[in-house]
Image (cartoon, rainbow, N blue to C red):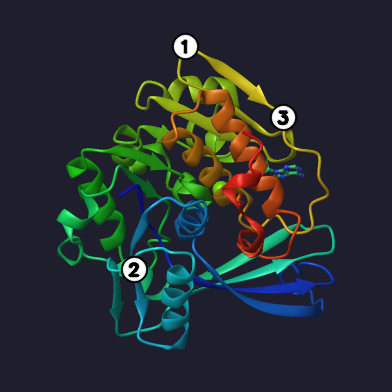
Amino acid sequence: MDVVGFGALNVDRVYLVSEIPKAEEESYVIDVQTYSGGSSANTISALAKLGLKCGFVGKVGSDDFGRFLIEDLRGYGVDTKGVVVSEGRTGCAMVFVDRDGKRAILLDPAVNDTIKFDEIDLDYVSSFKVLHLSSFVCKVSWDSFKSQERLVEDFDGIVSFDPGSVYAKLGLKRIEKLVRNADVFMPNEIEVRELTGLDYKEGAEHFLKFCDVVVVKRGEEGCYVTNGRESYEVKAFEVKPVDTTGAGDAFNAGFLYGFLKGKNLKDCAILGNYLASLCIQRVGAKTYLRYLDKRYLPL
Ligand SMILES: Nc1ncnc2c1ncn2[C@@H]1O[C@H](COP(=O)(O)OP(=O)(O)OP(=O)(O)O)[C@@H](O)[C@H]1O
Ligand SMILES: [Mg+2]
């Protein structure tokens, strides 16, 4: 088996709004759509659509949204044996997108934060070559976070890790065990600054103490990737963004796909930028997956 994801499973309610309101302000909703989401679930769905054998470890509530998320993952060919269905609400991300494609997110972590280590089938997880981690909000409980810490220590394969803004805000000390056990670390530029106080290049250098490969996502600038021996600035594809939700998740999928296919660092980065460019040209983090086919990859 190829890649197993471990992270939050959310329903994304995407509101297209006239403006993203600040406190005491109001604006209006132009349209609203419901999508399946969760950062590593988005990445895993894309990898499955590209033909890799993928699975997922996570938790949903026993409600309609939970059933919707499981069905959705299965639709991309993801194995959902590792998804626990429990009492309580399924996680929900309310995403507000303005006309320029900028966004704000309000998260209801619900049951996501409550995954206990003994709810995870370790034999199942160890049947995969890569374990891909994304963040939990850690507002309801630290159970899922602690389970990630224990799982990365036990896992013999390759660990890839996207901290997202949530873990970046926790600070490096707090997430150090996860970073130390990651082989491929995939933050964005803002998260690097948050975690280290350094710019993306110096920050990436810093993380090389812990990780084999560091790839920093830099929005419309593209990305920076290094393994200490080779480093590349790889330009983004020139496209018009409509909605950047899930750009980082799509990037991770492209990068990891290349990595598993044995491509060189630069080509992995190009594949990351490519999938992200497809993602941001449509509203919704996974809408591009309908048209994704490995035969049309640029490499
Ligand atoms: N305006 C843009 N034009 C072309 N590509 C873009 C643009 N914005 C983002 N991308 C692509 O998306 C990738 C990821 O974007 P970004 O750096 O914003 O990641 P992120 O902040 O982690 O995303 P997310 O918020 O989805 O987690 C970039 O590395 C780049 O390839
Ligand atoms: Mg991100």
- Classify 207 as above or below 185: above
Pick the residue in front: 114 or 289: 289
Helix, strand, or loop for circle 3?
Answer: loop
**Could you say where residue 174 lies in the image, as x and y percent from the top left?**
34, 43
Residue occupying image coordinates x 17% and y 43%:
154
Q: Secondary structure at mark 1?
A: loop
Label 1 – label 3 distance at C-alpha:
20 Å
- Residue labelled with disc 3: 235
Q: Residue at x 61, y 46 (%)?
A: 295
Would you say 94 lies left or right of 257 here?
A: right
Location of residue 291 by image quarter: bottom right
- Judge left or right: residue 184 versus residue 131: right
Check residue 80 in the rendering and tell me which mark sits there, or answer none.
2
Indicate the position of residue 277 as horizontal and vertical percent values: 71, 46
State the image coordinates of residue 265 (x, y, percent, origin top left). 52, 24
Q: Distance of mark 3 from mark 2, alpha carbons?
A: 35 Å
Q: Height in image: 12 above or below 136? A: below
Task: For label 3, count other residues whose C-alpha is less than 10 Å away and answer few (under 14), some (14-19) or many (20+).
Answer: some
Q: CA distance from mark 2 to mark 1?
A: 38 Å
Ligand 1 within 8 Å of disc 1? The answer is no
Going by the numbered disc 1, the residue's amino acid type is Arg
**Residue type at the position of mark 2:** Thr
State the residue in front, 239 or 221: 239
